[in-house]
Image (tube, rainbow, N blue to C red):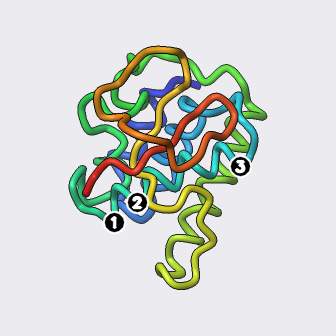
Amino acid sequence: MQLGWILWIASALPAPLADPLCLAATVYLEARNQSELGQRAVAEVVLRRLEQGRYGDDVCAVVLAPGQFATGRLAPTVRLEEPRAWERATRIAFAALEEWRLGPGRRRYVVPRADHFHVDDGIERPWAQGEPVAVIGDHAFYHVLR
């Protein structure tokens, strides 16, 4: 299945129906090789950015914002080659959206306050100042927006 096909379907749906597809695509692309906890953390960052309202009004707008997530940087012809990883990313996306609907006082956070992350690949990122909120697998999570 191609990423472009999934995002095209999402673009034809109203946000509440499209959000899980866009979130699953992002979790898959950013963290399919990570633990479930790491994938939940990626989903949480996306949902926190949505809540902040600085990157878009729905999940698809947030993950497709220029230069923010792999979802918006990769060619739409990229194929989702790992069906089990896609299934897991989809399950995690739906669960994360359900968790987020509980409201701030009832959520179980994985990476509290984190609104950015990067793969720990030795490349310096100017926005990644200080200690990360958490390191899960090969991803470091940061609270950047103040």
Looking at the rendered structure, the secondary structure element under dot 1 is: helix
Q: Position of residue 62 (x, y in %)?
A: 32, 48
Disc with the residue nearer the chain's start (3 vs 1): 3
Residue 37, label in figure? 3
Identify the amino acid type marked 2. Answer: Arg
Residue 134, label in figure? none
71 left or right of 90 in image: left
Asked if residue 40 is positioned above or below residue 29 in the image, the reply reads below
Residue to which mark 1 is pinned = 51
76 left or right of 33 in image: left
Asked if residue 116 is positioned above or below residue 69 in the image, the reply reads below
Residue pictured at 33% horizontal, 65% vertical: 51
* Distance from Cα at disc 3 to Cα at disc 2: 16 Å
Do residues under tags 2 and 1 come within 8 Å of each other at their CB atoms?
A: yes
Question: Label 1 crowding class (10 Å Cα cut-off): few <14, some 14-19, many 20+?
Answer: some
Looking at the rendered structure, the secondary structure element under dot 2 is: helix
Do residues under tags 3 and 2 come within 8 Å of each other at their CB atoms?
A: no
Identify the amino acid type marked 3. Answer: Leu
Residue pictured at 35% horizontal, 24% vertical: 125
Q: Position of residue 97 (x, y in %)?
A: 54, 65
Identify the amino acid type marked 1. Answer: Glu
Residue to which mark 2 is pinned = 48
Residue pictured at 24% horizontal, 61% vertical: 53
